[in-house]
Image (tube, rainbow, N blue to C red):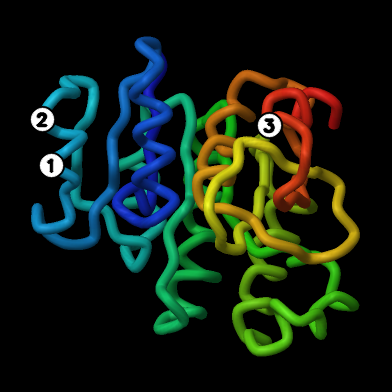
Amino acid sequence: MEKVFVVGGTGRVGTQLVAQLLSNQNFDVKIGLRSNSNQVNSSLSEHHARLHYKFFDLLSEQSTISKQIAGFDYVYFVAGSRGQQLIQVEIYGVLKLIAAASENDIKRIIVLSSIFSLEPDHWQDETLKDIPDYNVAKFVTDYWLVHNANVPYTISHLIETPAKGTIQVNVTEDGENAIGDVAETLYQVLFLPNTINKVIKMHSGSTPIYRALKEI
């Protein structure tokens, strides 16, 4: 059985991602929580012996983070500070997590980011122009992951609407991106080696998710 650690597993995307992971009998899932059990999703906990929780804080020292993810096969980052701690969490915290994943020879770190995070020319697009600091934060961590980190990665992106089960990849414009579709995309990349070391620019489309990813 493979072990998956999810940072942000109680959030909007994380909850649906964890449900997808638990649907596969080959995964044992642990969610990192910054606070106590009031964040625990009881609807999942009640019927999944393969779901566990532990205290985890991206504000911790890198050595602490490294110890906490030791022994896991995959690490997901699907958390966010809601703009409150961009430097400490969205930048420095994620950089520490990436370094810890490298130290532990994690098979892959999969990061939820922002569309066109690595393409500043798009930051004046309608959905991005009002979040300049967030764009910069995601640029810093995604650029580091792509160009400097010694760990396999996949980066995907999120905007919000209802799930359709179909997407478009390699997009050149922003668009609607359903939470459920993003969660399924984050799950499906585990089974597709062609998505390793890829930034997946996506939004809602007409191609079933697995097939769209397989063709990247």
The quarter of the displayed image where residue 193 is located? top right
The residue wearing badge 3 is 209
At numbered mark 1, what does the secondary structure look like: helix, strand or loop?
helix
Residue 96 in picture, x, y percent from top left: 49, 58
Q: Residue at x 61, y 36 (%)?
A: 165
Callout 2 crowding tier (Cα within 10 Å): few <14, some 14–19, many ≥20? few
Residue 27 in picture, x, y percent from top left: 38, 18
Q: Is residue 213 above or below residue 93?
A: above
Q: Residue at x 78, y 39 (%)?
A: 206
Q: Mark 2 belongs to which amino acid?
A: Glu
- Image mark for residue 46: 2
Residue 169 in picture, x, y percent from top left: 81, 43
Q: CA distance from mark 2 to mark 3?
A: 29 Å
The residue wearing badge 1 is 42
Which sits earlier in the primary sequence, circle 2 or circle 3? 2
Q: Is residue 170 above or below residue 210?
A: below
Q: CA distance from mark 3 to mark 1?
A: 28 Å
Nearest the viewer among 118 and 129 is 129
Q: Is residue 210 left or right of residue 108?
A: right
Q: Residue at x 35, y 33 (%)?
A: 19
Q: Mark 3 belongs to which amino acid?
A: Ile
Nearest the viewer among 150 and 191 is 191
At numbered mark 3, what does the secondary structure look like: helix, strand or loop?
helix
Q: CA distance from mark 2 to mark 1?
A: 6 Å
